[in-house]
């Protein structure tokens, strides 16, 4: 990657898991990467580790994607420092799992606010800057849970199918401005989110770097081509 082809990227929820895998894959390709998370300690620790591992600039910021103002302030900081935004990865997400008649309403709201509204905030704040720069890529990390509902998953399923709908409509709105948008729907990925859901062996699962490869491969796609909905699943899951 030459300086001329290096891109400026923002990955939400980049302090661990899939987001961190995407941050690292972008750094390995010499892109300049910004990432965010809510925990200041995790953001600081990840930024320090990545700065030791990669020569390309990486900057971590505390930003809760539930706040439009916070996301807009981060995008403004990126514009002031780097002058552009070429890649936005709306990855920040969480899950609360309980039957629909038992889940605490504020828990349900939190899942929607992070997974769905958070991605909208990223698009709403980031797309104008991308447009000014002539276009870019937006990746929305959804889930196979967008189409595969499961008991106890009302909040998560609703947030992820909503995110796929948002992604497709946003793609239609923005493609004429040179912004390509893809919803990436992973199956089970070995991360902390998965560990907190249930204790189980993780050797059969996808790894964060597998999802990251979807992002870096799509960045290399010909400009005329837009894979807008990608499913990626473990090749050999346990038999049910
Ligand atoms: N793991 C899977 O099996 C799987 C499968 C399909 C899709 N996904 C999706 O992939 C994405 C990443 O999941 P993961 O498994 O990597 O989860 P994870 O290990 O729990 O990491 C989630 C990341 O998002 C950040 N985050 C959470 N809430 C945030 C908020 N309000 N604002 C900013 N950052 C926030 C977390 O940092 P803080 O907690 O410090 O904020 C962390 O960096 C999620 O959207 C998830 O739904 C995961």
Image (cartoon, rainbow, N blue to C red):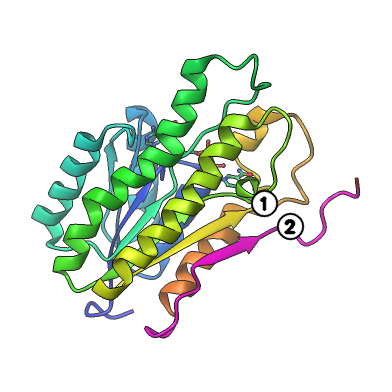
Q: Residue 101: x percent and y percent?
A: 65, 16
Mark 1, ligand 1, within 8 Å: the answer is yes
Q: Specify which label sits upstream in the sequence, 1 or 2.
A: 1
Question: Relative to the observer, which residue lies in front, 138 or 163?
Answer: 163
Q: Is residue 27 left or right of residue 112?
A: left
Q: Residue 3: x percent and y percent?
A: 23, 77
User: Residue at 42% of width from left, 85% of height from top?
Assistant: 222
For label 1, the residue is: 187
Vertical placement of residue 229 versus 208, above or below: below
For the N terminus, give its image quadrant. Answer: bottom left
Residue 236 belongs to magenta span: yes
Question: Relative to the observer, which residue lies in front, 175 or 138?
Answer: 175
User: Residue at 30% of width from left, 48% of height from top?
Assistant: 122
User: Residue at 33% of width from left, 37% of height from top?
Assistant: 65
Q: Which mark is residue 234?
A: 2
Crowd class of label 2 (few under 14; some 14 to 19; many from 20; radius 10 Å): some
What whole-number distance in Å separates the C-alpha atoms at marks 1 and 2?
Answer: 7 Å
């Amino acid at each position: 990657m030459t300086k001329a082809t290096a891109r400026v990227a923002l990955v939400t929820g980049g302090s661990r898991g899939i987001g961190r895998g995407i941050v690292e894959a972008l750094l390995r390709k010499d892109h300049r990467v910004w990432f965010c998370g809510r925990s200041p300690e995790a953001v600081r620790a990840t930024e320090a580790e990545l700065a030791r591992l990669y020569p390309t600039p990486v900057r971590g910021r505390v930003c809760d994607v539930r706040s439009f103002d916070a996301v807009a302030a981060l995008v403004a900081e990126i514009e002031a420092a780097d002058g552009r935004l070429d890649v936005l990865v709306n990855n920040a997400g969480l899950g609360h799992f309980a039957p629909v008649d038992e889940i605490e309403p504020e828990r349900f709201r939190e899942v929607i606010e992070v997974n769905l509204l958070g991605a909208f905030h990223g698009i709403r704040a980031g797309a104008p800057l991308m447009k000014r720069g002539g276009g870019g890529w937006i990746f929305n990390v959804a889930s196979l849970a967008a189409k595969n509902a499961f008991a106890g998953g009302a909040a998560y399923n609703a947030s992820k199918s909503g995110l796929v709908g948002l992604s497709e409509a946003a793609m239609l709105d923005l493609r004429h401005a040179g912004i390509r948008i893809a919803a990436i729907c992973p199956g089970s990925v070995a991360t902390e989110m998965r560990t907190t859901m249930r204790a189980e062996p993780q050797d059969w699962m996808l790894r964060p770097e597998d999802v990251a490869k979807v992002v870096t491969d799509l960045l290399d796609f010909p400009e005329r081509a837009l894979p807008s909905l990608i499913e990626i699943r473990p090749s050999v899951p346990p038999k049910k």
